[in-house]
Image (spheres, helix red, strand yellow):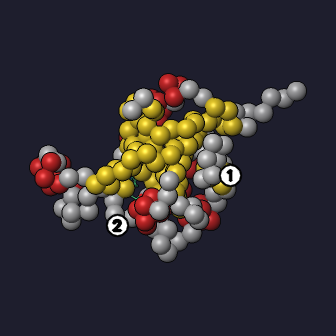
Amino acid sequence: MRKEIDISSVFEETVEYLKGDGVILLAGNPPNPMTIGWGTIGYIWGRLIFTVLVRPSRFTFSLMESSTEFTVNLLPDEFIRQLSLCGTKSGRNTDKLIECGFQIEKGINLVSPYIRESAVHFECCIVHKHDLIPENLDINIAKRYYPSDDFHKVYYGEILGVFREMPVPAF
Ligand SMILES: Cc1cc2nc3c(=O)[nH]c(=O)nc-3n(C[C@H](O)[C@H](O)[C@H](O)COP(=O)(O)O)c2cc1C
């Protein structure tokens, strides 16, 4: 059973996942799961925003470009194999949902789905996007992370809901 939760109860946990093995960005129709490690949660335009960064070389990039929504999914630790697979294989030539054994469920506030096996998921509506501006980027960051000029695009998703899987009460 999914229960809506407050962002404050999941903020630190989400940052730990981002810093660690990553989280799953699910976008497109049909949906494709991609592991991401770069993202922020914050408050802009009076709205809660989940910002994600996607390189143009990813299959997910074309899906994000034709989407108005996405979900971010936090997977329990036993899904390390799936996180690695979604971060190394491309949806261009692999059905990652099938390879991972993931089931999808229609979003609660969105048409787009979330991963049923996730412990927590964020439902986001894209309200802004832009390319990184190479000439405005710190030179050391540019050299280290963009040797082949594959500069990320930044997507701002307004968080329409955060949901946690809860045990069904036994009565
Ligand atoms: C831990 C981890 C974090 C990653 N974070 C990002 C990210 O934030 N943005 C990005 O564009 N790619 C990131 N990647 C790389 C993509 O997940 C990877 O290239 C993936 O195979 C692309 O899948 P797709 O072609 O189906 O979109 C990450 C990979 C790993 C393993």
What residue is disc 2 on? 57
Please state which of residues 41 and 118 is positioned toward the viewer in this rendering. 41
Q: Is residue 101 above or below residue 22?
A: below
Q: Are marks 1 and 2 in contact (CB under 8 Å)?
A: no
What kind of element bears circle 1?
Answer: strand
Can see residue 77? no
Residue 127 image point, x, y percent = 43, 45
Hey, what amino acid is under mark 1?
Answer: Glu
Q: Residue furthest right?
A: 171
Q: Is the residue marked by circle 1 packed among few (<14), some (14-19), or many (20+) residues within 10 Å? A: few
Left or right of residue 164, residue 138 in this image = left
Of residues 48 and 95, the one drawn nearer to the viewer in this rendering:
48
- Ligand 1 within 8 Å of disc 2? The answer is yes
Foreground: 6 or 103?
Answer: 6
**Is residue 155 among the parts visible in the rendering?**
yes
Q: SS at mark 2?
A: loop
| Residue 91 position within the rendered picture, expressed as x and y whole percent measured from the top left | 49, 68
Mark 2 surroundings: few (<14), some (14-19) or many (≥20) residues within 10 A? few
- Label 2 amino acid? Ser
Identify which residue is drawn at 55% across, 38% down: 160
Q: Is residue 66 above or below residue 164?
A: below
Q: Which mark is residue 105?
A: 1
Residue in the image at 15% along x and 48% along y: 136
Closer to the chain start, of discs 1 and 2, is: 2
Q: Which one is in front, 97 or 156?
A: 156
Q: Residue at x 78, y 33 (%)?
A: 168
Quadrant of the rendering where the N terminus is positioned:
top right
Quarter that holds the C terminus: top right
